[in-house]
Each structure stands twice: as C-alpha cells, then as structure tokens.
C-alpha cells in the first residue's frame, strides 16, 4: 500500500514543524498588512489641506500690517 504525503509527514514527525512554518508565514503577512494600514491611516490623519492666498494681503496675519492710508 502506498502512503500519501500527509501520512509521510506525520510518520516523520514533521506535522508540527509544517504547522509552525505556515503559522509563521501567516503571522508575518498579517503584521505587514497591519503595518501598511497603520501607515495609510497615519498619513490620512496628518494630512492638512493646503490653503492658498487669494491676494497678497491674505498672507498677513492681521490688518494692522496692511497699508496705513
């Protein structure tokens, strides 16, 4: 009778090693995905809209810095 690959893995005692390697790869993928999502969220929260001056006087803080006449 011929053995399948799963019986061979179990007979050699590699089933736990295979499970740990697969779990490690899944954990690594999840960490990378969460880190990427956290970076996107951080950039989205820290983005400030650009406010462009419509005239040269808009760049001044208050009217006291404008013309005096």
Image (cartoon, grey):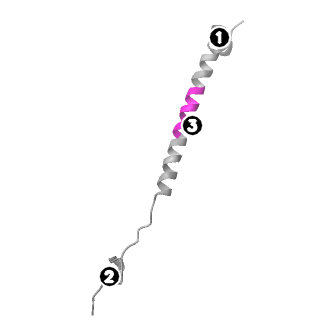
Q: Nearer the viewer, mark 3 or mark 2?
A: 2
Figure check: 55 above or below 33 = below
Q: Marks 2/1: CA distance?
A: 81 Å
Q: Nearer the viewer, mark 1 or mark 3?
A: 3
Q: Position of residue 22 (x, y in %)?
A: 59, 25
Q: Which numbered disc covers residue 62?
A: none
* 9 sits left or right of 62 in the view: right
Residue position marked by numbered label 1 in the rendering: 8
* Numbered disc 3: secondary structure: helix
Figure check: 1 above or below 26 = above
Viewer-side residue, 31 vs 13:
31
Point out the tag, 2 or 1, that comes first from the N-terminus. Answer: 1
- Mark 2 packing: few (<14 Cα in 10 Å), some, or many (20+)? few
Residue position marked by numbered label 3 in the rendering: 30
Q: Nearer the viewer, mark 2 or mark 1?
A: 2
Q: Residue at x 50, y 51 (%)?
A: 40
Viewer-side residue, 57 vs 68:
68
Residue position marked by numbered label 2 in the rendering: 57
Position of the C terminus by quadrant: bottom left
Figure check: 34 above or below 67 = above
Residue bounds of the magenta highlight: 23-32
Point out the tag, 1 or 3, that comes first from the N-terminus. Answer: 1
Q: Residue at x 63, y 17 (%)?
A: 16
The answer to whether the residues at label 3 and label 2 have Cβ atoms under 8 Å apart is no
Prevailing secondary structure class for the magenta stretch in the rendered image? helix
- Mark 1 packing: few (<14 Cα in 10 Å), some, or many (20+)? few
Magenta highlight on residue 31: yes
Q: Position of residue 5 (x, y in %)?
A: 65, 15
């Amino acid at each position: 009778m011929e053995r399948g690959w799963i019986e061979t893995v179990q007979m050699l005692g590699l089933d736990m090693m295979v499970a740990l390697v697969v779990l490690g790869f899944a954990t690594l993928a999840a960490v990378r995905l969460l880190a990427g999502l956290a970076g996107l969220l951080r950039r989205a929260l820290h983005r400030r809209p650009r406010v462009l001056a419509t005239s040269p006087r808009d760049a001044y803080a208050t009217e006291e810095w404008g013309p005096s006449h």
